[in-house]
Image (tube, grey):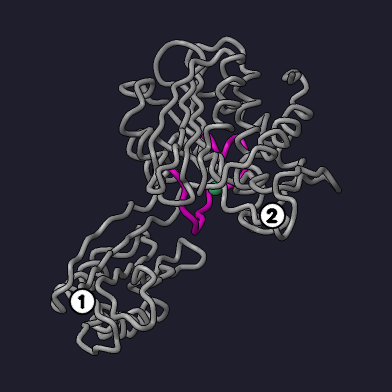
Amino acid sequence: MHNWSDADAAVVALTRELVAIPSESGSSNTVICEHLQALLRQGGFEVEWLQYLDAARQPKVSIVARKGSGHGGAGFFSHIDTVPGQPAEWEPWNPVVKDGKIYGRASCDMKGPLAATIVAALRAKTLAKPVVIVITADEEVGFGGATQVAAESQLLKGNWPDMGVIAEPTRLIPVRAHKGACQITVTARGVAAHTSMDTGISATMLLAPLLAEITEYSRQFKKDRRFMDADFHPPTNGFNITINDGGCPANVTAAKTVVQFNFRTMPAVATALVKDHICARAQAHGFEVETGGWDAVDTPRSAPVIRLGEQLTGLDAATVPYGTDALVFQAHVPLLILGPGDIAQAHTIGEWVEIEQLQRAVPIYERFISAVCA
Ligand SMILES: [Zn+2]
């Protein structure tokens, strides 16, 4: 049982408890979500369980929890999925406390931050407006949980929080903006044949000229200011190409090859310029083209939620280069990104979070609740 009155001890205990239950994006997360559901119910939250089957037919759960009645209030948004634990390299699910740090997979990204929001929310006394906790699946692999929550949550429908915090690690610096994402998927179709017959058409070889063209085009992204936004570090779009021929063996021509062009979008860069060029070139080669993505998050410093974040921390709002569930939730609630821990630790072997960061986060979140829900 947790003793929520001792916030410093509670946030450490809860972080360790969550780290000890694996929840890699590649597997079902029902065990940890049952644990969180029970914890939040005991704390007086109404809990909604949202679930879908991912591409590998694994059940993926997201949780929406609300304490207190009325409209609006304060929301905290975290993801529960983690990158792979890599247990051959270390003990990812055996949380160790040492030298003022908690070691373990997702201690930083982002079970420690989630624990800090839960401790703050459970400690909140009777308020005029509710406190909402949203915990999503699959943030690391395409925002599937956030997408389901935004589309299907009955608790949130028509009653989103007035303001929200994405609790991703920012070293407790308030963050108002991050890059978005643009994906262009291009499919080429060939004819599969054993190379001993030499009658096939390789879909990969059909794509090769386009790949060469776009690789050449992409050299501008690191040179030409039109493709950069000086508000971000780095100011460039992180352009990448990935290719999937379905594991075609060397002695068979690929029947179908899918290429993904990915880049990060930024407010000061005309996304359409890049997107339209790549799509037009792919279509000129006769390939199938599909596009997707999310707009960058770009909340002005004058927005009340950002001003509140600056007030609570005494720091100016910054920008970060990585994406969060804010890409999906920004359409529904004004968001601030603010969490304990350093993103440099995220996804590393030997991942850790400083206990001092977690313990500083709890009273900041409590003051956020008081300011929004009073
Ligand atoms: Zn994260």
Residue at x 46%, y 45% (from the top left corner): 138
Amino acid at the residue labelled 1:
Gly
Q: Percent position (x, y) of residue 90? A: 74, 56
Question: Furthest-front residue in view?
Answer: 196
Q: Quadrant of the N terminus?
A: top right
Q: What secondary structure is marked by label 2? A: loop
**What span is in magenta?**
308-325
> From what the image shows, is residue 12 above or below residue 263?
above
Q: Is residue 200 visible?
A: yes
CB atoms at circles 1 and 2 under 8 Å apart?
no
The image position of residue 36, as x and y in percent, is 58, 26
The CA span between labels 1 and 2 is 40 Å
Task: Give the residue displayed 58% in from the left and 36% down from the top.
Answer: 311
Query: Residue 190 has which mark?
Result: 1
Q: How many marks?
A: 2
In the rendering, at what x and y percent does residue 139 appear?
47, 46
Q: Residue at x 61, y 15 (%)?
A: 43
Closer-to-camera residue (23/235)? 23
Q: Nearer the viewer, mark 1 or mark 2?
A: 1
The amino acid type of the residue labelled 2 equals Pro
* Left or right: residue 290 compared with residue 250: left
Residue drawn at (60%, 23%) of the image: 121
For label 2, the residue is: 87
